[in-house]
Each structure stands twice: as structure tokens, then as C-alpha cells.
Image (spheres, coloured by chain):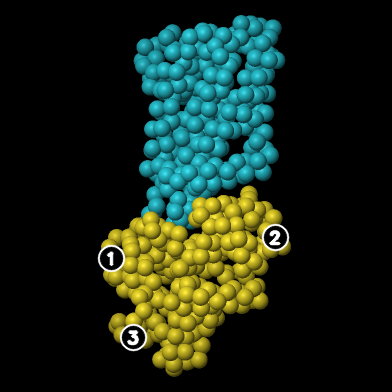
Chain colours: A cyan, B yellow
Amino acid sequence: MNLRITLAVAHRVLIQLRRDKRTMAMLLVLPCVLISLLWWIYEDANPMLFDSIGPALLAIFPVIVMFLVTSVTTLRERSSGTLERLLAMPMGKLDFLVGYAIAFGLVAAVQSVLAVGVSVGLLGLDVVGPLWLLTVVAVVDAILGSALGLFVSAFAQTEFQAVQFMPAIIIPQLLLCGLLVPRDAMPPFLEAISDVLPLSYAVDAMQHLTTSTSTGQVWQDVAVVAAFAVGGLALGAATLRRRTD
Amino acid sequence: MMNNAVEIRDLHVVRGRHTVLEHLDLAIGGGVTGLLGPSGCGKSTLMRCLVGVQRIADGSVEVFGKPAGSAPLRDRVGYVTQAVSVYDDLTVAENLRFFARVLGAGRDHVDRAVASVDLEEYADDVVGRLSGGQRSRASLAVALLGEPELLVLDEPTVGLDPVLREELWTLFHQLADSGVAVFVSSHVMDEAERCDRLLLMREGRIIADGSPDDIKQRAGVDDVEAAFLAIVRQDRGDAS
Ligand SMILES: Nc1ncnc2c1ncn2[C@@H]1O[C@H](COP(=O)(O)OP(=O)(O)O)[C@@H](O)[C@H]1O
Ligand SMILES: [Mg+2]
């Protein structure tokens, strides 16, 4: 791995994002809008529910958004020939992957600061644990989303196909992560499945943070999510072939 | 004899269901070497082999005495893919600065590369909003970064206006004079005259190899397109 090249990739991805106003809005503004919408829905019916669902959303947004953005951008690199060109240059696979992870991790940090700011500052979400740890969890979640997106981009030929992985890979995790029904209240079979899905741990970490001052469990959950992210990046690296047919 | 930049021995490449290159032997030295042949004959496949991004079934490809695509070669070989491979959402200068950082080339390389392809006026324009010819010149500029010793250019002049094409061929010869081995493909026969050495390719085989004058003389005609036809006809005669 080469730091100069890794940072060059991260810098380039950030310039591309900055130029794309609509994607920037999706990354930074949309999560705040959606979380406000959620708060508004429950305002009259059951304000307590916002406190239990809000934290889960803070974990889910980075995963979904980064999954989408990464799967499409890396697919574009594969099909436009820029990836082929980079791999013919002194570019290591890790430089490429880690460069992307750094760029999206940074964006996720900003995204989470904004979303947490709105949730806690404006909407009165109760967070018992340290706020900064919420951002750490969100960044790890974002890297997980990027890793998954990078991996699936190898199996798509078009951007349209890449987007289709979203319902296939993300929605099942969304249903099983404890957002709709607490995980320990699910049928045992489904609970067992949710135990091996990374988003469950991402959501658990956020929920712990909002209800408890002890951070040991949070770090454990973060470690599980990080392990999935590293596994995803390793799988993604395996799909980046210098030589192709 | 001068050492060749490229040595290909018994190269065999299969893509999908088709054998694209079969038992290909070829050495490429200095000067401007042109690879001409109809679309689909295997030009891009051969070029991909030289930069080490093509999976090969058999044989060997060596560049400067090392296996093609190996790490020590990656900043010594400049490559232009047939598709325009720069980022559409970055400006010309941003693209070049990025690739220069990857190659470890200085800022002065960026300015020089932009000037070489005559894009100074458009350096701060987003590539996606340039014309086809301007975009392919931006892609070509990337290959000039970092003073490569071998340039592999896959149809770099397609769709350019004649004046610009003339300028680029002059640039290729300047580079060749300064010691760079230039390997350039085209499917347009009238570019053949500009090469020091010409390789005519058809269905994955090199059917003629020599200076444009030699090839025309041997075929007894006075343009390269006619020579190509004559050689193919003769080839078929031999085969039957
Ligand atoms: N991505 C690919 N997958 C499978 N086969 C391919 C691919 N690209 C090209 N081919 C095959 O390789 C042959 C040579 O293609 P190519 O090297 O691109 O020719 P040229 O550059 O001379 O037009 C084509 O006839 C095609 O059948
Ligand atoms: Mg081609």
C-alpha cells in the first residue's frame, strides 16, 4: 500500500462528490429531512416511539446511502475503463479500496454530525451515552455500506442492475435488524438469521448508546460491524482483477 | 541489435468463445510502430496484453525484459484504452493531477501533457462537457504523464479533425525521436503512412510487417489499403 496513492484516490472521490450537488444533498440533507419526518409522524400518536426508532435510523442511513453511492461509482469505474487504466499504473488494490473508504468515511462523519445534531438538538432525541461515539458508529456503518456496495458492483453490468442489489441485500437486513420488532421478540429462526447480519449490530450499537452510559457493549457491536466491513472490502478486493478476460 | 521494448512469444488469447490471438510472435522496438487492421481483428486485445490487463491462455509477453504488467513496469508504460478512460465529472486538469499523483509525477508534467494535446484552453472544463475529440485528447494526455518509455495507444486519433491528427502524429514522432517506443493502433488505413514500421493484422494474425513503402512495394500497389487487400487475397490463395 502507498499512502500518496491512497490519499490521491480519496481526494479525487471527494472532488467528484463536491461537484455532484444532487448526490451531496442526498448524502447530507436527506437523512436530516427523513429523520424529521419520522419525528413528525409520531408526534401526536406516540412520541416515545421516536426515541426507540430514531437511533436505528441513525445507523441505517449511512449504510443505505453509502451502499448506493459506492455501488454506482465503482461500477462506473469498472465500465468506463478508468479502473483498467489505474490497475495498469502503480495502483494497488488496497490503495483503491482504502481511498474510497476514507472518502466515504469522511462524508459519513459529516452526515452523522448533521443527523445527530438535528435529532438531539431539534427533535429532542434522548442520548444517554457520549455523542461522539454516535459518529464513530455511523462512520463504521458507512464503511460497511461502502464495502458491500463495492462488492456487489462486480456482479452488475449496468447502473440499473447495481441499484437492484439494494432491495436484495439491504431490505432484508432492514426488516430483521430490530427496527420493526425487537430482535429478541422475533421467531427464533429469524432471530438466528438477524444474529449473522451486520446491520443488526449497527442498530444495536446505536440503541445501546441512547439508553445506557456504559460503552463496552457498543464497542463490541462496532467491532462486529467493522469485521463485516473488512470482510466486505476483502471480498471487494478479490473482485478487482488486474487481468480480465 | 538494440534490445527490443517488447518481446512476444507464442501468445495465445481466448476471449469468451473466441480465440482472438493464436501463436503470435512479435518484437517491437523503437520508433513509431503502427498496428492496423479492421475492427474486431484483435488490436485492443494485443494492446491489453502489453500492459498486462488481459488474461492470456498461453505464451509470454515481456516488456523491457520483464513480464508485462509486473510492478516495476507500471510507471514505465503509458496506456490509452480505446474507450475514453478519464473521469467525466472532473476537469481536464483535475484528471491529470489525480493520475500524476498516482504515478508520482510532478505538477510540471501536468502542464506539459495538457500542452502536448493542445487542451490549454479547456484545462478547467469538466471533461463530460467537452467534444468527443477533446475527451480523447484528455485521455491521451494521461498516458504522457511521468515520461513513459513505452506508449501503448489504442486508436488515439479516432474522430479527430485532420489538422489535429497531423499534430498528434508529429507528437508521436517527437516522442519516438526522444527514445520512447510508440505502439499505436488504428483501423483507418490512411494513418499507415505515418508509421516507421507497420503491422497489418487480420483475424488475430499479423499478415504483413515492414515499413509502409516495403509493404506497398511487395504487394505491387501504391496505397496501404490496396496492399492490405492484395495480401489478404494472396493469403487465401495460399491457404486453399
Ligand atoms: N470483453 C470481451 N469479452 C469477450 N470477447 C471479447 C471482448 N472484447 C472483445 N472480444 C472479442 O475479441 C475479438 C477482438 O476484439 P478487439 O481486440 O477489441 O478487436 P479490435 O480492437 O481490433 O477491434 C472480437 O472479435 C471479440 O469477439
Ligand atoms: Mg479495438
**In the picture shown, does residue B165 fall above or below A150?**
below
Q: Earlier in the sequence, mark 2 or mark 1?
A: 1
**What secondary structure is found at the residue carrying circle 1?**
strand
Question: Callout 2, which amino acid?
Answer: Tyr
For marks 2 and 3, give the one nearer the viewer: 2
Mark 3 residue crowding within 10 angstroms, few (<14) / some (14–19) / many (20+) = few
Give the chain of mark 1.
Answer: B
Tell which residue pokes out farthest to the right in this image.
Answer: B121
Tell me the CA gap for discs 2 and 3.
52 Å
Q: Name the quadrant of the N terminus of chain B.
A: bottom left
Q: According to the image, label 3 marks what residue?
A: B237
Name the residue at 52% across, 83% down. Answer: B193
Do the CB atoms of the residues marked 2 and 3 lie less than 8 Å apart? no
* Label 3 – label 1 distance at C-alpha: 29 Å
* Residue underneath mark 1: B59
Residue at 29%, 70% in the rendered image:
B9
Of the two numbered discs 3 and 1 in the rendering, the one whose residue sits closer to the viewer: 1
> From the image, which quarter does the C terminus of chain B lie in?
bottom left
Q: CA distance from mark 2 to mark 1?
A: 43 Å
Quick check: can you spot residue A39?
no
| SS assignment at label 3 | helix
Q: Is residue A170 above or below residue A123?
A: below
Image: B73 above or below B38: above
Q: Position of residue B185 (x, y in %)?
A: 48, 71
Viewer-nearest of discs 2 and 1? 2
Chain bearing mark 3: B
Q: Would you name the residue on which mark 2 appears?
A: B122
Q: Do residues under tags 2 and 1 come within 8 Å of each other at their CB atoms?
A: no
Mark 1 residue type: Gly
Q: In the figure, A18 relative to A59: above or below?
A: below
